[in-house]
């Protein structure tokens, strides 16, 4: 299970990335993230909707009321120009973190064996 | 979706939505968005084989308790809960002011219509107070009955449009208050012109207690707000109920100052009923009937106070000097005008005495002189202003010369 802090930090890039694939609405966003994360990331409505409104206020996304096939009205969100550039910068930052961690965790098993490092975090993570 | 059609009549979603409407931070747009989400969630759960009721329960459970939603919406928004709360506080204050104004209108309408039936000022005053209290009850009932109405007519109608546009609601309320207040002033002036001063004086004497009724109404309002908030289990929201109380108190205290300013005129007419003998005599003189004034002066009982409490000539020198500059100027002018009248009356009485003595009516001539001396002694007291003392001495000199 992902920690609360990490979920909070990753909400913005995730929303931007999903909306980059096309417009969507709140319920669908929650479903998509749950599916893509293998049910590891579970967004709450009380968190997501205010966050979407904040992103809209920031000019990252825009919204529009539309009639769905069921005849019910839904509020659809789509990416704006500012959102696209924000996504690009987010992508760079997350990849930097990801690459750093990957490098560390790839070499760690060797280091722990020779230096007996007790810095913790991923000691059990071995690679053949 | 037939299951939705079945749910709708049950009104579960309507009830759920009504609970959210209580949350000040959530706009109808926010609630509509959540409602769409709820319907999507219910549809998915139904496909998984849950019953209508189960689906509704699970879906609402997932969305979260209204209080949690409110805090979530408030904490994530950049401005927080306060703009929304301030808006509702302003609405509350305006509604309170409107109720006060409507109460005033009601009380004066009572005075206007009921005086045809009973010419008794005190009774009218009490009926007026009752009308004020009833107006508060009516406004209170209307406000309490309002939230469900907003819910029921939320899809169309004037309420939704008003609630969605806070500025429009505030503007409408301000316009209502201003026009009502304007109407109240017109009505007041009209009724004052129509009513005899004695009846009006008594009416106002009782109607002064309106401030108390307004205050009790305000306290009830605040207590109701606190209880309502507590009932919803949001202890932290207590502040938003207490703040309107403070605002309201400020408004009432401002209103009280206003009120003591407005009935300055009625107060004078109330005093018309309780004027002293000498003040009546002076009023007769001012009205131009000099002979009647002289007769009244000769019958004056000089052992009683000459002036009623609160009149300019009741001021002592120290009291007079302690007045603010503007007040001193005004009261000083009034004192001079009154003293001028007193001197005129005394001069006329002396003339009357001289005429009587010429006719050989020594008793009347003596009476004239003793009355003037008595008046001079009454005015020349340490409790009078210096200028009044001077006039009193002059009056006494006037008669010693004569004798």
Image (spheres, coloured by chain):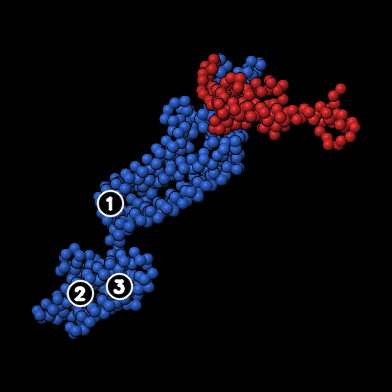
Cα distance in 3D space between marks 2 and 3: 18 Å
Cα distance in 3D space between marks 3 and 1: 32 Å
Q: Which mark identifies residue B304? A: 3
Q: Quadrant of residue B271?
A: bottom left
Cα distance in 3D space between marks 1 and 2: 35 Å
Q: Nearer the viewer, residue B142 or B177?
A: B177
Residue at horizontal 44%, vertical 30%? B161
Residue at horizontal 14%, vertical 75%? B352
Task: Say whether residue B222 is left or right of residue B264.
Answer: right
Residue B114 showing in the rendered view: no
Of circles 3 and 1, the one toward us is 1
> Label 1 marks which chain's residue?
B
Badge 1: few (under 14), some or many (20 or more) residues near its Cα, within 10 Å? some
Label 1 residue SS: helix
Confirm whether circles 1 and 2 share one chain: yes
Q: Quadrant of residue B131?
A: top left
Residue at horizontal 25%, vertical 54%? B196
- List the residue tagged with mark 1: B192
Image colour for chain A is red
Confirm whether circles 2 and 3 share one chain: yes
On screen, residue B11 above or below B23: above
On screen, residue A5 above or below B219: above
Q: Which chain is blue?
A: B
- List the residue tagged with mark 2: B346
Quadrant where the image shows the C terminus of chain A: top right
x, y percentage for residue B145?
47, 35
Q: Nearer the viewer, residue B388 or B379?
A: B388
Residue B94 showing in the rendered view: yes
């Amino acid at each position: 299970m992902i920690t609360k802090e990490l979920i909070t930090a990753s909400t913005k890039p995730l929303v931007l990335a999903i909306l980059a694939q096309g417009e969507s609405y709140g319920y669908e966003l929650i479903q998509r993230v749950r599916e893509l994360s293998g049910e590891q990331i579970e967004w709450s409505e009380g968190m997501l909707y205010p966050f979407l409104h904040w992103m809209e206020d920031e000019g990252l996304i825009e919204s529009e009321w539309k009639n769905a096939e069921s005849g019910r009205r839904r509020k659809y969100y789509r990416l704006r120009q500012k959102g696209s550039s924000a996504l690009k910068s987010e992508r760079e930052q997350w990849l930097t973190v990801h690459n750093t961690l990957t490098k560390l965790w790839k070499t760690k098993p060797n280091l722990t064996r020779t230096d007996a490092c007790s810095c913790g975090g991923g000691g059990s993570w071995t690679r053949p | 979706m037939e299951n939705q059609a079945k749910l709708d009549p049950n009104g579960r979603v309507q009830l759920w939505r009504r609970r959210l409407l209580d949350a000040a931070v959530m706009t109808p747009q926010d609630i509509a968005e959540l409602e769409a989400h709820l319907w999507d969630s219910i549809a998915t759960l139904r496909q998984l084989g849950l019953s209508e009721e189960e689906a509704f329960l699970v879906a609402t459970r997932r969305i979260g308790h209204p209080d949690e939603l409110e805090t979530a919406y408030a904490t994530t928004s950049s401005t927080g809960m306060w703009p929304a709360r301030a808006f509702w506080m302003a609405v509350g204050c305006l509604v309170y002011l409107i109720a006060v104004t409507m109460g005033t209108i009601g009380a004066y309408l009572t005075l206007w219509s009921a005086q045809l039936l009973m010419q008794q000022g005190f009774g009218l005053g009490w009926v007026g107070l009752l009308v004020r209290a009833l107006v508060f009850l009516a406004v209170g009932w209307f406000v309490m009955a309002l939230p469900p109405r907003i819910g029921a007519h939320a899809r169309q109608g004037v309420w939704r449009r008003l609630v969605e546009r806070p500025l429009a609601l505030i503007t409408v309320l301000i316009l209502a208050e201003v026009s009502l207040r304007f109407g109240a002033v017109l009505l007041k002036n009209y009724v004052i012109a129509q009513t005899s001063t004695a009846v009006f004086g008594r009416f106002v004497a009782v109607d002064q207690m309106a401030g108390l009724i307004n205050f009790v109404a305000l306290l009830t309002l605040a207590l109701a707000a606190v209880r309502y908030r507590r009932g919803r289990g949001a202890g932290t929201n207590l502040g938003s109920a207490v703040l309107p109380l403070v605002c309201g108190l400020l408004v009432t205290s401002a209103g009280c100052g206003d009120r003591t300013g407005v009935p300055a005129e009625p107060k004078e007419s109330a005093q018309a009923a309780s004027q002293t003998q000498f003040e009546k005599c002076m009023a007769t003189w001012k009205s131009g009937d000099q002979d009647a004034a002289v007769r009244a002066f000769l019958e004056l009982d000089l052992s009683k106070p000459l002036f009623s409490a609160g009149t300019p000539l009741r001021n002592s020198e120290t009291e007079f000097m302690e007045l603010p500059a503007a007040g001193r100027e005004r009261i000083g002018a009034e004192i001079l005008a009154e003293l001028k009248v007193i001197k005129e009356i005394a001069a006329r009485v002396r003339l009357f005495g001289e005429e009587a003595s010429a006719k050989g009516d020594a008793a009347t001539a003596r009476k004239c002189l003793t009355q003037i001396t008595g008046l001079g002694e009454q005015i020349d007291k340490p409790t009078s202003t210096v200028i009044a003392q001077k006039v009193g001495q002059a009056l006494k000199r006037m008669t010693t010369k004569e004798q």
